[in-house]
Image: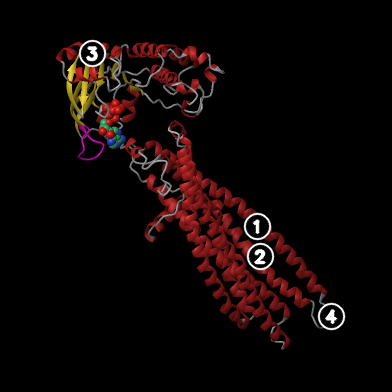
Amino acid sequence: MVRQGGFGSPGRRHRRYTSTGDSTIKDSRKTLQRLWSYLGRQKLGLITVFLMVLASSALNLASPYLLGRGIDAMNLGKEKVDFASLKVTVFLLIGAYLLGTLTTAVQTYIMASVAQNTVRDLRRDLFAKIQTLPIRFFDTRSRGEIMSRSTNDIDNINQILNQSIIQIFSSILMVAGSLFMMFWISPLLTFLNLIIAPVGFLLTRKIAAFTHQQFELQQEALGDLNGYIEETVTGQKVIKAFGREQNVIESFREINKRYRSAAVRAQILSGIVPPLMNTMGNLSFATVAGVGGWLALRGIVSVGNIASLLNYSKQLNRPLNEIADQFNMIQSAVAGAERVFEIMDESSETDDPLEIYAPENWEGNVVFDDITFGYEKDKPVLKNITIQALPGQTVALVGPTGAGKTTVVNLLMRFYDPDSGKICVDNYNIRQVKKDNIRKASSMVLQDTHLFSDTVMENIRYGRLDATDEEVIKAAQIAGAHSFISHLPQGYNTLLSRDGGNLSQGQRQMLAIARAALANPTILILDEATSNVDTRTEIKIQKAMKILMEGRTSFVIAHRLSTIRDADEIVVINEGRIVERGTHEQLIEKKGFYYGLCKSQQHGYQI
Ligand SMILES: Nc1ncnc2c1ncn2[C@@H]1O[C@H](COP(=O)(O)OP(=O)(O)OP(=O)(O)O)[C@@H](O)[C@H]1O
């Protein structure tokens, strides 16, 4: 990825780590339907959860009523307490509280596993999808963005599944149930309550909306902060080499300050909401209690009923606010889900049904026939490229940087398909052969080898997964890697740190050669390292590459005279066209482009 800007521009926007975004209602509905298709797979769990929510809501609704019955059983103001009915009510009340707690615990427990199973399926499908996406997809997106979708966004979805479904369902039941009970007990007091409650509700909503905005700003600032830290950590070498530590600290201070202010605003505002809600709640409580008391004195409503009603009115405000909060959360999670489904909707590497499996005993006769190709439409990077390599031959691709050498081999691996012309291996047009079929015939040894955080043994075995330990060791011997591996602390069982950071570049290349040797391909693609490794290692690598190339059709992006001299044909590419071809001697004699390239020594050619 090409990064814009440098380490001194705190004002620029780093990529967002949050998952908010605009989405139309129609899209949201579609996304919710798709989410449901995942959630719906946990039918049994979901039904149990709904039954539990139903039960716990009913029990919660029963408690204020029972409380009222209990108070009335005391016959306040009269002489005799009705102990019999008081006893029953108290037992029922205890039962309702206990059962309520139990059902809530069960519903939380089951919902957690329903949610986890659902996001597990989502993650699995997303990961599997990512493996099928063409290289072109990865060219156009940053790693961080793909990571963020696979982790943050899916986490967000998990959160709403875990909380919102239960919350919304139970809140709706509680609001409806409380209202019903309140009206049943006293329409007049309910009416009074309903005048005050919405005012408080609307006021807190207004503040909450503003707070939400502040939280978004805070998240944005956090995204910048994260981005800056990530960039400066990965770029430490460059920062130190150019002595920019102080600038980086200054810039960080700026971003940190912005984050602090945004966070303070968000926290203060969000701190206001609970006391405000309390005040509003208390106000309506006091009004209902006052008027209720007056009605009780006149014998219109019993004291127990007023107590029940006050409890219901308390239960009314909370779910209303909870529903509103949950909708905000859902919005952000739906935006995240949209980003996840967006990747799932990307077209995979096309698996054309007409593609065939060619027999795997390849000979390695490779022909590039008048190939033209561009990564972007109408911007050809390769123009009319024709190359033939007979079985066992070596073709050296030579040319200045950006000429199109890597692109040639990218097409042979079918990472991309040419816009026109065809590439044939043993007379099969590779476009008509299954991708994994053709990729199995070839191995790549790249300058920048990717090593996984695993043991040396497993990293080499990546070349052929069913290889035995002995075969792995033999491949390492061919690659000249055996001796350095033996000197590692745990030999072949040494764990490599991320991307082989604890190995030298030469050693990493040797492992790549061992990997390729183990794969035993018919076609070999080598990208010679331009960076300087010490002479002894370089001689070893050269020797290993030579052994590896024996009897295989090889395409080498060559930088060293020894490789170039041994090539059957040197193909000189400049600006996407073949400008010369022939052997080293022929081309030097011609005194053309190749000759100039060698003489200038500007392009890493150590000739
Ligand atoms: N994934 C990509 N998307 C768009 N353009 C690309 C991509 N990869 C390479 N290019 C462009 O295609 C052209 C050829 O690149 P290529 O990597 O094939 O050159 P090269 O000869 O291998 O160079 P080098 O010796 O520096 O590796 C360059 O102009 C490059 O900017």
Tags 3 and 2 touching, CB below 8 Å: no
| Residue 406 seen anywhere in this rendered image of the structure | no
Label 1: few (<14), some (14–19) or many (≥20) C-alpha neighbours in 10 Å: many
Relative to 87, 333 lies left or right: left
Tags 3 and 1 touching, CB below 8 Å: no
Q: Disc number at residue 80?
A: 4
Q: How many marks?
A: 4
- Residue lying farthest to the right in this orientation: 79
Residue 511: percent from left, percent from top: 43, 19
Camera-side mark, 3 or 1 = 3
Label 2: few (<14), some (14–19) or many (≥20) C-alpha neighbours in 10 Å: many
Q: Quadrant of residue 135?
A: top left
Residue 110: percent from left, percent from top: 59, 51
Image position of 427 with respect to 149: above or below: above
Q: Which residue lies under the disc numbered 1?
A: 103
Q: Which residue lies under the disc numbered 2?
A: 59
